[in-house]
Image (cartoon, rainbow, N blue to C red):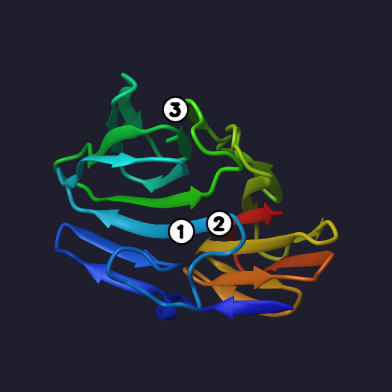
């Protein structure tokens, strides 16, 4: 079973400084049919205006992953971490017993475009932790696992395929998957996806990806 979640069907919030699309219920957007998928709780596609951002705010018992698509995101947290996340970099915070952090557009001229992902951890009260790593820029026509530790039986991949390229993936029994498009056109088992679309995948063990144009996406393999 593959259920397509079209880009325009996501929740949308426009705050002037922040343009945000929500794949699942978040903040003022509530849809009981889209509260998350397995351990995947949040996928927000955010565009933050120059020099704007999220002031200090707390999190607890959540695995928070940020993937910057363009621009630069400035991070600061109560663990003492401070720096800039650049395009192609992935950041992960294990909020655990509690973390306070801020995220701001590091540029005064250009917006920053990012995906923020929340995954529910397999245990509560973990020690807060921080990781930041660069994904290879030359990776193409494959799935590349995010090089971060996730406290959950979940794998997160970035996929980049050139037009006409095919890729297969074997999904384990009793596992599910979520595919979130970033750019381009892709077919998944003959289902067509474009930028912003997603696919919820259940009871499918063999997946075939066919790029109809150069494309990029995130793929989640979930218990």
From the viewer's side, name the closer residue of 115 and 56: 56
Q: Quadrant of the C terminus?
A: bottom right
Tell me: residue 179, above or below residue 66: below
Relative to 112, does residue 21 appear above or below in the rendering?
Answer: below
Q: Earlier in the sequence, mark 1 or mark 3?
A: 1
Instruction: Report the residue at 60% width, 67% height from top.
Output: 213
Question: Foreground mark, 3 or 2?
Answer: 3
Q: Is residue 31 visible?
A: yes
Marks 2/1: CA–CA distance:
8 Å
Give yes or no for contact between labels 3 and 2 (Cβ–Cβ under 8 Å).
no
> Residue 179: percent from the left, percent from the top?
61, 63
Question: Which mark, residue 43?
Answer: 1
Above or below 85: residue 207: below
* Element carrying mark 2: strand
Q: Position of residue 47 (x, y in %)?
A: 29, 56
Q: Quadrant of the N terminus?
A: bottom right
Q: Quadrant of residue 221?
A: bottom right
Can residue 212 be seen in this snapshot?
no
Find numbered disc 3 in the image and state the secondary structure of the residue it sits on: loop
Q: Residue furthest top?
A: 80
For the residue pair 107 and 222, the one nearer the viewer reads as 222
Q: Quadrant of residue 167?
A: bottom right
Q: Please indicate whether residue 88 sits to the left or right of residue 111 in the image.
A: right
Residue at image position (84%, 65%) is 205
**Callout 2: few (<14), some (14-19), or many (20+) C-alpha neighbours within 10 Å?**
many
Residue at the image position 27 percent from the left and 69 percent from the top: 28
Q: Are marks 2 and 1 in contact (CB under 8 Å)?
A: yes
Q: Name the spot of residue 126 as percent of width and height, x first.
A: 51, 30
Q: Which residue is mark 3?
A: 128
Q: Nearer the viewer, mark 2 or mark 1?
A: 2
Circle on res. 40? 2
């Amino acid at each position: 079973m593959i259920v397509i979640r079209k880009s325009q069907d996501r929740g949308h919030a426009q705050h002037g400084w922040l343009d945000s699309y929500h794949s699942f219920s978040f903040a003022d957007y509530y849809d009981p049919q889209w509260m998350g998928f397995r351990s995947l709780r949040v996928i927000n596609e955010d565009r933050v205006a120059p020099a704007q951002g999220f002031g200090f705010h707390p999190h607890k018992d959540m695995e928070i992953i940020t993937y910057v698509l363009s621009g630069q995101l400035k991070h600061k947290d109560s663990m003492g971490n401070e720096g800039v996340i650049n395009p192609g970099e992935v950041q992960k915070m294990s909020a655990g017993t509690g973390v306070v952090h801020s995220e701001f557009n590091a540029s005064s001229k250009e917006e920053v475009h990012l995906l923020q992902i929340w995954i529910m951890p397999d245990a509560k009260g973990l020690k807060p932790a921080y990781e930041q790593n660069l994904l290879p820029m030359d990776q193409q026509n494959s799935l590349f696992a995010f090089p971060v530790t996730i406290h959950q039986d979940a794998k997160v991949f970035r996929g980049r395929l050139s037009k006409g390229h095919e890729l297969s993936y074997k999904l384990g029994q009793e596992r599910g998957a979520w595919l979130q498009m970033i750019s381009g056109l892709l077919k998944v088992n003959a289902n067509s996806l474009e930028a912003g679309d997603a696919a919820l995948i259940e009871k499918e063990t063999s997946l075939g990806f066919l790029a109809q144009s150069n494309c990029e996406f995130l793929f989640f393999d979930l218990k």
